[in-house]
Image (cartoon, grey):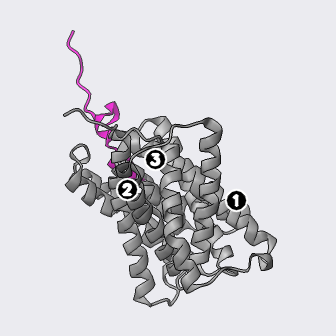
Amino acid sequence: MPTLIRNQMNFRDWALLILLSFLWGGSFFFVEIILTQLPPLSLVAMRLGLAAVALWGVVLFTRTRLPCGWHTWGVLVILGAINNAMPFSLIVWGQTQITSGLASILNATTPLFGVIVAGWFLADERASLRKFVGVLIGFIGVVLMFAHAAATGHTSIWPQLAILAATFSYAVGGIYGRRLKKMGISPLVSSAGQISMAFLMLLPMMVYWEGLPTLSQLDPWVWGSIGGLAVLSTAVAYILYFSLLETVGATNVLLVTLLVPVSAVCLGVALLGESLYWSQVFGMACIGLGLLVVDGRWRKSNLFKRSHPSGG
């Protein structure tokens, strides 16, 4: 059976993965602002609802072919649950009780789950010692970057378990989403479909548990954060996510969660004037090394091959 994906990413793939990491890295910043005036389910529902409107607007404008059949929409329902509704809600709830730095560390366990689950279920993404070691090195880098944030006195285990459950859900969603390419569904429609299904699932839960939010009382910077979270960190981000998923596979695209903390730190330094610590620089270096090991291209490079003098 021919390989359906590129196990080694090219320059374009890496560029898109880095861009995706910045879009998702900003989501932690947006969420912290929005949580000051909105409860978790209302935040997630607004994020999904506005993102769905934006995506369907693009679908209609581009006249992209829509999927048909109950089976196709059933796949999008399942994907909306495990890739959006469940992990978004768990992470946002977790962020109400732990710092965004610690949340970033826990979120970075996604590739570890991804390597294991993809290696078990996908023939063209077999698990290997090289991949596992590379992801582990990258995860150590994330821990080093946010070691100071983890030591904040927050000892409650439930928020941390909630975010770990979310990362496992992300990993399963990445593997399950691979089937969309075989079904001929475009990344744009995949994004719009799954986010819409997730919104429809969460809406009645939001109304029941939290009631309708009083939107007129939200401050301008909260509205700006909601717009950034919905359009940039959700709508645009998931178009990139599904584009990468169908070309480089679940294991590679889930590496983005190792890059998200790097992007978040860079955004904080550039936009908020935050300090950059040596532990963070060393952590970034570990993440880069881990990604290099996962990619595996260095093993085929002449740089690591022993040169043999030619006879003559």
- Does residue 255 appear in the picture of this structure? yes
**Residue at 65% from the left image edge and 39% from the top image edge:** 61
What residue is at 47 percent from the left and 42 percent from the top? 243
Q: Amino acid at mark 1?
A: Ala
Q: Which residue is mark 3?
A: 242
Where residue 149 sits in the image (x, y, percent)? 53, 78
Question: Residue 311: within the magenta?
Answer: yes
User: Does label 1 or label 2 sit earlier along the sequence?
Assistant: 2
For the magenta stretch, what is the residue range? 289-312
Sequence order check, earlier mark of 2 and 3: 2
**Residue 139 is at least partly visible in this image:** no
- Seen in the picture, residue 261 relative to 15 is either above or below; the reply is below
Spatial separation of the CA atoms under disc 3 and disc 1: 29 Å
Residue tagged 1:
270
Image quadrant in which the C terminus is located:
top left
- Residue 188, above or below 43: above
Residue 242 spot, x, y in % from top left: 46, 47
Q: Nearer the viewer, mark 3 or mark 1?
A: 3
Point out the frontmost of discs 1 and 2. 2
Q: Nearer the viewer, mark 2 or mark 3?
A: 2
What residue type is disc 3 on?
Answer: Phe
The residue lying at 37 percent from left, 51 percent from top is 70
Query: Residue 209 in magenta?
Result: no
State which quarter of the image contains the N terminus.
Answer: top left
